[in-house]
Every structure is written in C-alpha cells, then in structure tokens.
Image (cartoon, coloured by chain):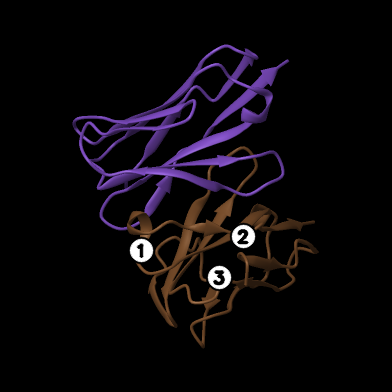
Chain colours: A brown, B purple
Amino acid sequence: GAGVSQSPRYKVAKRGQDVALRCDPISGHVSLFWYQQALGQGPEFLTYFQNEAQLDKSGLPSDRFFAERPEGSVSTLKIQRTQQEDSAVYLCASSLVGRGGRDTQYFGPGTRLTVL
Amino acid sequence: GQQVMQIPQYQHVQEGEDFTTYCNSSTTLSNIQWYKQRPGGHPVFLIQLVKSGEVKKQKRLTFQFGEAKKNSSLHITATQTTDVGTYFCAGEGYSTLTFGKGTMLLVSP
C-alpha cells in the first residue's frame, strides 16, 4: 500500500476487556515495530518483527500484551484485560529491510486506545 | 537502560526567530534519527545521522551529531508557522530505538 495503515483509529474499551489492534505495513517491508505513545511523551518501543519472527519483545509492559505477525505482513497487537494505564496511542512502523537506524521507519497513523 | 533526554520540553517563538532543540543520550549511539510529529499526527522521519561530528542540512533545518556520538541538535533558522509540531530525537544503541520526550514548538505569526 501507499503507507502504513492501522485500524481501528480509535478504540474505547471498558477496563477488563480484551482489544486487538491491527497494522498493515507497507507492502514488501520486512521489519515491523510497535510503539506505545502516552500523552505528551515520545513513542516507547514495544516489540519488533522481522518477517514473521518476533525478534524482540523486551518493551512489552506485561504478559497481558501479545503481538503476532503470522504471515510476515499484517500484525496484530492484543491487549488482554485492559487497564486504565494502557490508554495511549499505539503506533506501528515498518521499514524495508534492517532494524532501527539502518533503515527509515515509516509510521502509521496510530490507534488511540482509551480504557474507561 | 538507555535514556534519551531532550530539552527544552516546549518553546514558543515568533515567526522568523530561530529554534534549537538538544538531545542527550546516556550511552554512545550507533546513530541518531530526528522525527517531526504534527498535532494529532504520527511521527515523520526527518533525517538520520551516523558519523561522529556529522552535520546535515535540509533547507532551514540543520542537524548535528556530537563527536562522542552521545548528543545531537536540531536548529531551525527563521521559523515559519508550518514548523509547528513536536520534534523527537531517537537514538539507536545496541538494539532498540529510544525516543526522547520531544520538544514542542509553537510559532506565532
């Protein structure tokens, strides 16, 4: 596609509900990243995929967070039993080949999650 | 873990004035990137600096990477209202890309 797309753009969940956030990276991009951006803060790394392999999940804040990219393209970030502190914008980024600074990361518009 | 600090948090200038934001890392970086995020938008890549002491220019924007590869700066000459947004630096150390908290720039006409 022309850019990274994410859905839904906005999600309101009641505390305790499970949510699933979707990311469609740029076609052909090998690397995919998830970030969490709280209000007034910079994006914080959550997890990284190279194709279908999850190579780094060190940023996931708890075992309630789970990400997958089964076919090396679309990725889903799942949050179980959501808590109020999970409220944030979840950003997905993809890059053509390498990780981090070796290749430009292109960000999607984000999903704004509000947990009531 | 790696920390990236940015100052100032916020700056309000008159159109035509210059603006500078500074970024400091707690560890030596392999490279540093700069992003711009408009209000309600997502981060957009501006530039990457890799070499010690590197200076790059994009029109009115000048980016510098320190000799020790632990600090960087972004300078905007003669700001315009279109420069409004939050500017983030992001440093890559061993693996993860770590973002600073950003500097929010407001420009009054």
Most extreme residue toward the bottom is: A71
Cα distance in 3D space between marks 3 and 2: 9 Å
| Labelled pair 1, 2 in contact (Cβ < 8 Å) | no
Quarter of the image with the N terminus of chain A in it = bottom right
Whether pointer 1 and pointer 3 mark residues with C-beta atoms closer than 8 Å, the reply is no
- What residue is drawn where x is 48% and y is 30%? B59
Question: Looking at the image, which residue is at 52% across and 14% down?
Answer: B18
User: For residue A108, which numbered disc appears in the image?
Assistant: 2
Amino acid at circle 3: Ile
> In the orientation shown, which residue stands out farthest toward the front?
B59
What residue sits right under mark 3 in the picture? A26
Q: Tag 3 or tag 1, which sits nearer the N-term?
A: 3
First in sequence, mark 3 or 2: give its number.
Answer: 3
Which is in the foreground here, disc 1 or disc 3?
3
Badge 1 density bin: few <14, some 14–19, many ≥20, Cα 10 Å: many
Label at residue A99: 1
- Label 3 element class: loop
| Residues at marks 3 and 2 on the same chain | yes
Q: CA distance from mark 1 to mark 3?
A: 15 Å
Q: Secondary structure at mark 2?
A: loop
Quarter in which the C terminus of chain A is drawn: bottom right
User: Numbered disc 2: what chain?
Assistant: A
The type of residue carrying mark 2 is Gly
- Amino acid under label 1? Arg
* Residue B101 in view, yes or no: no
